[in-house]
Amino acid sequence: MNMWSLLERAFGWGGVIAYHGVGEKPLSPVMHVSPARLREQLELLRDRYSVVPLRDLVERWRRGGSTRGCVAITFDDAYAGVAVHALPILRELDLPATIFVASDHAARGATYWWDDVERQRLAHGSGPWSEAPGVVGLTPSPAADAAAMERVRSRVITRFAGRWPHELQAGGDTLWRSHDFGELTSLARDERIEFGVHTLSHPALPLLPYREQVAEMRDCLTLLRERLPRVLPVIAYPYGLYDRGTARAAVEAGMIAGLTMEGRATSDRPDPMVVPRIGGAEVRAAESLAWHLNRALRPALIIRNRGRHPRLPVDRPSRPTIGI
């Protein structure tokens, strides 16, 4: 018996996989995934695990049943590339999935600020970068590098509660935008697809007043149920961020489960309101995905992440600029 089999027998494995956008040449390989990489990962999940609808996992969590060997597939932000690239693969492999919808974005078919900013950053190459940093009150960066992008991200979350301080923009023909509600209605014709709550405006919930947190989740659920079938009262916390107050607000908003992003396998019987997910992205090989699903790694990942819960980013000042 090899090491992999021993770990499987000793610890079991399973959990929830979180994808975002799907398209050729992903803007952000640590977040999005190409169709080829997605197929590789989904084929591994089909072959090694029991891939079940998210609602089945939620029911097992709520009744205290075992989820050993079970995996659910989710897509956050309802990117338009899901219908174009992911749905054909899901149909071919006969796999269910849940799409989490940020309803303000779906109302407009809007792009997400982090993709718009990343596209702008990449267009600057290694040169100085002032546009996006200036919008959020940062001094220009000497280089449009990954560190500059992280400073913008941290500033948006910490100073603006995760919302870009300009109006949402419709995305047109790009796949790096939210489906609009008409497109989501078409997608819903496939009964493999369920939908979940990703709030109204995609904020960093722990940075909002408690009542606003409740409204962001409750009103999104109400709107989705008016427009779409098979809507689960399950929240995928935007940016994966929550605290105890957020979990309490989720319950008050009518949620029966809450999902975060923590890069570790869930326990066999997790707290349904704070269930970690593992990110499926271009940078992750299929075999790596399997290792992260194995619960044997959970203690090491908790140590690496410095705790069981995600940490809010720190708003660090820009580096000094010279000659800009």
Image (cartoon, rainbow, N blue to C red):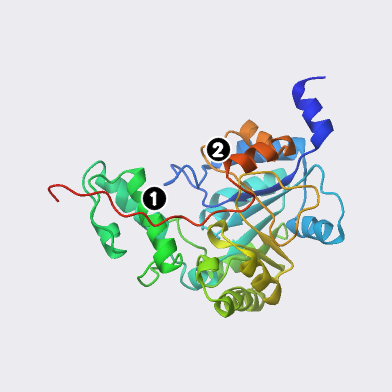
- Report the quarter where the N terminus lies: top right
Residue positioned 55% across, 78% down in the render = 212
| Residue at numbered disc 2 | 36
Q: What type is the residue that disc 1 sits on?
A: Glu
Q: Residues within 10 Å of mark 2 (few under 14, many from 20)?
A: some
Decide if residue 85 is on the left or right side of residue 128. Answer: right
Decide if residue 170 is on the left or right side of residue 256. Answer: left
Q: Nearer the viewer, residue 151 or 128?
A: 151
SS at circle 2: helix
Q: Is residue 262 visible?
A: yes
Give the quarter of the image for residue 126: top left
Q: Position of residue 39 (x, y in %)?
A: 61, 39
Farthest-out residue, left: 323
Decide if residue 269 is on the left or right side of residue 90. Answer: right
> Which mark identifies residue 87?
none
| Residue at numbered disc 1 | 150
Q: Position of residue 82 (x, y in %)?
A: 56, 54
Decide which of tag 1 and tag 2 comes sooner along the chain: 2
Q: Position of residue 152 (x, y in %)?
A: 36, 56
